[in-house]
Image: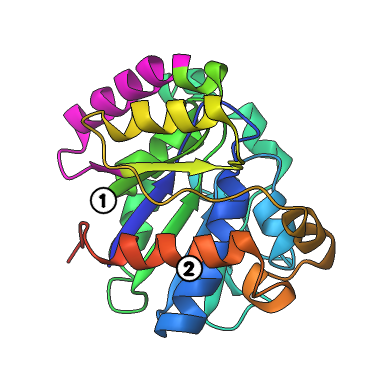
Amino acid sequence: MRTTAMLNLKGGVAKTVTCVNMAAILAADYGRRVLVVDADSQANTTEFFGGADGHQTLSSLLRGEYITPHATIRHSNVKGVDLIGADDSLMDLDLSAVKSKEADVTCLDRLLASYMDEYDNVLIDCPPAFNAASAAALLAATDVIIPIKVDAFSLRGMANLMRQIRNMQNINPNLQLAGLLPTMTYRSEKIRKALDVLTASDFRVYPAIRKTNKVDDMTFAQRPLIESSPHSAACVDYRRFVKAYLGGGADRG
């Protein structure tokens, strides 16, 4: 089972869009059994996949309130994709909650260990902040993908993000950086030069995702691109990205 955290401390870089489309493509195109974990208090991934539907959320797990895993995991509205949802109570669980032991950041790792044979891929949509939920995600993950909008602000924030990942690798030595995923790209000399800088770095850089209004349409329809706009540029690019992602990475178990 490969567990991948979608992480960037900057918002608006298409973490959620990447997570939901990657999950749908893994399930539909490759027959993978996929579990999506929403670790963001905005709960956009949860809403996209049909809501928590009375199930307990990741916040319940972090607070030690769940009774059984089945009370937390639900089927989503996309075939082959299950969900652990989020709610806004995750906002209350910052790093101080970890220090006071109000939040148990090992909970997700333990839950996933009991589902080794149930899923092929786990995707975790992390918040744009380093808090209890993102710490739990990185403790449970085998690898990290960093969706990155190719602008100056995102590029400047990479150093802080990499420092946080290295800190978590001291606790979870199995955690690997699977690569960077440029998102929302378009024809521009500045974008091309920025992509050249990323490609020349020591990081693996996945094929870029082009910007298209079909992504906005997808969020309103609550249907992934392979259903709502399968021939759009972004869908073509996400399929290419998933193919590259499956070409290498870490499996757990």
Residue where numbered disc 2 is placed: 239
Three-letter residue code for mark 1: Thr
Residue drawn at x 17%, y 28% is 170
Residue 48 found in image quarter: bottom right
Magenta residues, start to end = 156-178
Tag 2: amino acid: Arg
The CA distance from mark 1 to mark 2 is: 21 Å
Residue 22: in sight, yes or no? no
Pointer 1: residues within 10 angstroms few (<14), some, or many (20+)? Answer: many
Residue carrying label 1: 142
Q: Is residue 31 magenta?
A: no
| Relative side of 140 to 193, left or right | left
Please name which of the two marks, 1 or 2, marks the residue nearer to the observer: 2
Mark 1, secondary structure of its residue: loop
Magenta residues: mostly which secondary structure? helix
Up-down relation of residue 215 to residue 229 (above or below): above
Could one spot residue 7 in this view of the protein? yes
Q: Quadrant of the C terminus?
A: bottom left
The one nearer the camera, 72 or 249, is: 249
